[in-house]
Image (cartoon, helix red, strand yellow):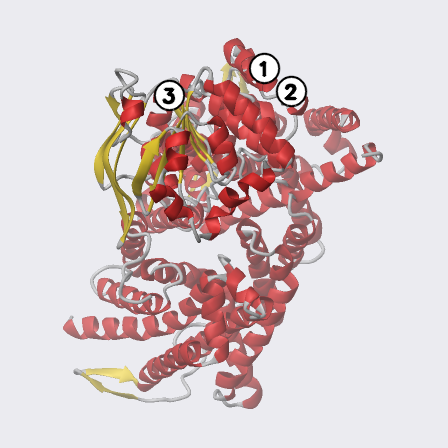
Amino acid sequence: MSPSSAGRAAEPILRIEGLTKRFGGLTAVDRVTLAFAPRRLHAIIGPNGAGKTTLFNLISGFLPSDEGRVFFAGQEISRLRPHRISRLGISRTLQVKSVFQQLTVSENLWITAQAKRGVMNPFRSTSSYRDTCEKVERVLEQLELTRLADRQAGTLSYGDVALLEIGMAIAADPRLLLLDEPICGMSPAETERTVVKIRELAQTIDIVIIEHDMEVVFEIADDITVMAQGAILASGSPKEIAANEEVREAYLGRPEDEDYTEEPARA
Amino acid sequence: MIARTTIERGLLWGTGAFLLSVPWLIPALADRFWVNVIAEILIWSLFASSVNLLFGYVGLLSFGQALFFGFGMYGVAIGVEKLGLGFWPALGLGVAAPVAMAFVAGVFAVRLTWHYFAIITVVFSLIFYFLALTMKPLTGGDDGISFTLPSTFRFGASEWGFAQEAFQYLFILFTVAACLYAMRRLLGSPLGKAFMAIRDNDVRASLIGLNVYWLRLIAFVIAGFLAGLSGALFAFFGRYASATYMFYHVSGEAVVWTIVGGAGTLLGPLVGTSLFIVIREVVSTHWQHHSLIVGAVAILIVIYAPRGVVGLWRDLLDRWSAPKS
Amino acid sequence: MTNTLIALSINGLVWGLIIALIALGLSVIFGLLDIINLSHGDFFMIGTVIAWTVLTTTGSFWPAFLLAPLVGFVLGALIQRIVLQPIRNAAALSIVATFGLSMILQEVVRMTFGPTPRRILPPIRGTFDLFGIDYEIYRLFAAAVSILALAAFFLFLHHTKLGTWMRAVRHDPETATAMGIPAQRVYRVTFGLGFALAALGGVVASPITTVDFRAGVDVLPFCFMAVIIGGLGNLPGTAAAAVLLAFLEGIISSFATPTVARIASLVLMSAVLLLRPQGLFKGLTK
């Protein structure tokens, strides 16, 4: 639990209490307690296997937790199914980029924007849903994807897929956005473009981001939580984390810390 | 792209005009038994469309659609022969029975996906196939039930019914065309897009807030409707119903027709069904071993045109119409 | 009554062992190549036809035990190379391809062997007294051969290089390829072995059932039931499920029709699929 972030707002957007997930003998997420204050960009970092993605899976209802509770804007969501949680206003992206391959870019956004509002009408044409279509146009413009609107998602470049993925996450009008390694595998130019977009989004949406690229994390995050072996190692502002001895130790001598050590060179 | 859609639209109008004129054109130009062959192609392509809806648009490979086809057939045959119903009530029964069955079967089946889904649909259809075999008094077992045709419309002294070849053909044509048109509307609707989202990525679909289970169940029931309606039409067309049409081979043929024609395209099932039934009709008059050719064509298509005949056609046209890119 | 019960349940047991052989082939092909092989029943049928051909041309039944698996293996390897390798592991396409294959195999047999079912007399005549009923000696022999073949197959899988490769490729094809295992050749051998097992099952079963170009159509669903109830890819489970199912159907047939018995096992199969999709025996073996 991070006192610095918990103290700032009366009600955290997301509150996690003693969340635990075991896979056989392995405890992937170990009694994690966290609170994310609204209007701040939170980053979760940690070596591979630290349980970051599992934590996202638990929050979004993708895996059932063994113990603990999750509250979203004060409402308990621990036992809800993924599509219910999504409809409450939590969007997430997946680490392995996954969009609807055979749908076009705008269809991808359309179905995401419409999903919560009801999709059971079998006769009305999608183009007659004015609100949803406008929303799609806005997101296309916001992410500069308009020129790709009619392309099949399966034919996009990697960086464009990643942008579309973020676009889908915001097309759903979420109150909270969970981004799982949004820039992983991108070229430097794509990374820069994406980071700018994430920053813009953070003006209006609460964001929690898992990221390996330390340069990016320290550039954009307001608060950072460090996980190791399923548990929380430290929480605090980027400055506090950078100065934390334990965090440095956890990263030293691991192949995953390449990003971290290379940081000065790239900067 | 423009060239392709223009060519395709032309082809579509041409095919439509041809299909409409069949009852008059065929007897003038060829053997009149082709009218009934084309009627049969239309019925079976409606059946294949139910596989196509599930596999091509929702990503579920059903190997048990014959179950609903059989329920459609028996709904009509039992309705006419045992309950003494007229044409329309019997048709209603032939649609309601498979839809109800699809709902019950779907509640269980769509909990599974992929191989497991394919297998449980076969299992369900086999259970009812064997049940139909044992319940001889009701179903006639292997021999089936024959019935006398009730008339469809009656205005005073004049009657219209399946006994008139042209009426029978046009009734089938309009029913199948209406279903395909409704399916086209469906594919452009929110429900259709939700189906395709699930087909492309069911995990992602549930993450954006779609109720994957419920949507799959809806698709399964719609597919049950299509298969059931085709079975009901086939019962009127053949004046009988038989358990043999519930065997898994019938389901399997629909899967083959769909994939060979082009799964995930509206007209793929029609193309695939036409291809195989025409081969069968043409070859079987000269050579009784037409299955050899059917099997070989199926294999060649999946090897050389994995997206089916329609996919192949589109690739070729796109290459031809856009040589620059 | 008790006599028929005993006879039918022992018949079920014998039949189950033969089915186990065929289902094992199906399961290996499924587990390794991810192919739902709809032509597998016809592989069995080819075995019965080979047995009939060998018997009528040479006058002796026994060479079929060698010839059928051999022909089956070669045919299987060829089919994998020509038909299945080009479509890779696209499961839906492989279903269509094996369906087409099934039509071709049946039609070729109908052309050459003819459409009328025939019977083969057991090569070992005579009966003996089993709990008060006269029981055919050949059936016991058939059971023994099946058990031997099953044992040989499991020994092969666990004690030869090829068997280890097959298990490795099944476990993780990418790593296996990276380690230098020729995955394509392993696939080919696997498909060949699957065919060989089914053909051998056909030979063993031929004096008990009829030789008919449609024989595979009835056998296929039963094999799938064994594979599902045993757990997809779980080989010992598949063998056990085949025996269990046939035994149960044998017992049920003693007081109801065989069709009712078949319905009962299909219902059991649905329950397994819905409640324990990993199969009944998960946990007993890796």
Say if residue B135 shows up in the picture.
yes
Q: Give residue C265's quadrant in the image.
A: bottom left
| Label 1 packing within 10 angstroms: few (<14), some (14-19), many (20+) | some
Relative height, residue B130 to residue C187 (above, below): above
Relative height, residue B26 to residue C2 (above, below): above
Percent coordinates x, y for residue A258 in the rendering: 51, 47
| Label 3 packing within 10 angstroms: few (<14), some (14-19), many (20+) | some
- Residue A137 shows which numbered tag? 1
Percent coordinates x, y for residue A186 in the rendering: 59, 38
Cβ atoms under marks 2 and 1 closer than 8 Å = yes
Q: Chain of mark 3?
A: A
- Residue A146 shows which numbered tag? 2
Left or right: C28 in relation to A195: left
Q: Nearer the viewer, residue A231 or C212?
A: A231
Q: Earlier in the sequence, mark 2 or mark 3?
A: 3
Quadrant in which the N terminus of chain A is drawn = top left
Left or right: C229 in relation to C103: left
Q: Give residue A133's quadrant in the image.
A: top right
Q: Chain of mark 1?
A: A
